[in-house]
Image (cartoon, helix red, strand yellow):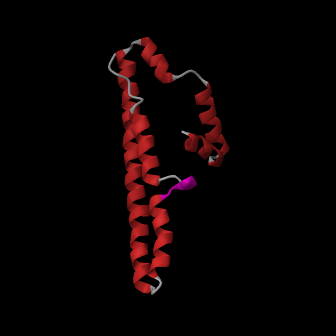
């Protein structure tokens, strides 16, 4: 959660203002749970499910275009250089670390799993 809050500093001002407005208001999830309205619950859970799909897609994109690409670059550089051990260390950092030095796949999966936990049991 801390990482996601820090990322707001890199957003366009209008996006940051929108998120701040939404988060300063009442909780939509709490409202739906309090309302005991099954239609609202179903719609809310549909939105959360769509976010989980988006987060899964993000994991796929990061795997395909960052992790696999950096691993291939590491192998290619190792073939081209006699000092392969030195070169292998830099790309492996890309494979294992994301923005802010976090474990990139752990971070993405944690965010996805936290999103899943926001689903509301059927009312």
**31, above or below 77, in the image:** above
Which quarter of the rendered picture does the N terminus lie within? top right
Residues in magenta, as a range: 97-101
- In reply to whether residue 99 is colored magenta, the answer given is yes
- Give the percent coordinates (x, y) of residue 53: 36, 42
- Give the percent coordinates (x, y) of residue 20: 63, 33
Q: Quadrant of residue 51?
A: top left
Q: What residue do we see at 63% from left, 40% from top?
A: 16
Q: What residue do we see at 37% from left, 46% from top?
A: 56
State whether the magenta stretch is mostly helix, strand or loop: helix
Of 37 and 82, the residue lying toward us:
82
Q: Quadrant of residue 14?
A: top right
Q: What residue do we see at 44% from left, 62% from top?
A: 95
- Give the percent coordinates (x, y) of residue 70: 44, 68
Which quarter of the rendered picture does the C terminus lie within? top left
- In reply to whether residue 117 is colored magenta, the answer given is no
Q: What residue do we see at 38% from left, 37% from top?
A: 50
Horizontally, residue 110 falls left or right of residue 10, namely left
Q: Quadrant of residue 3?
A: top right
In the picture as drawn, the residue positioned furthest to the left comes out as 122
**70, above or below 85, in the image:** above
Horizontally, residue 24 falls left or right of residue 40, namely right
Number of disc labels = 0
**13, above or below 91, in the image:** above
- Give the percent coordinates (x, y) of residue 62: 42, 57
């Amino acid at each position: 959660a801390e990482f996601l809050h820090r990322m707001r500093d890199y957003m366009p001002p209008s996006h940051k203002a929108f998120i701040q407005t939404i988060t300063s208001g009442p909780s939509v999830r709490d409202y739906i749970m309090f309302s005991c309205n099954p239609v609202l619950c179903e719609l809310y859970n549909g939105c959360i499910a769509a976010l989980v799909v988006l987060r899964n897609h993000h994991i796929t994109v990061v795997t395909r275009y960052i992790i696999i690409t950096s691993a291939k670059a590491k192998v290619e550089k190792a073939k081209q250089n006699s000092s392969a051990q030195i070169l292998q260390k830099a790309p492996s950092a890309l494979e294992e670390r994301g923005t802010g030095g976090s474990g990139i796949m752990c971070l993405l999966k944690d965010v996805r799993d936290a999103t899943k936990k926001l689903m509301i049991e059927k009312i």
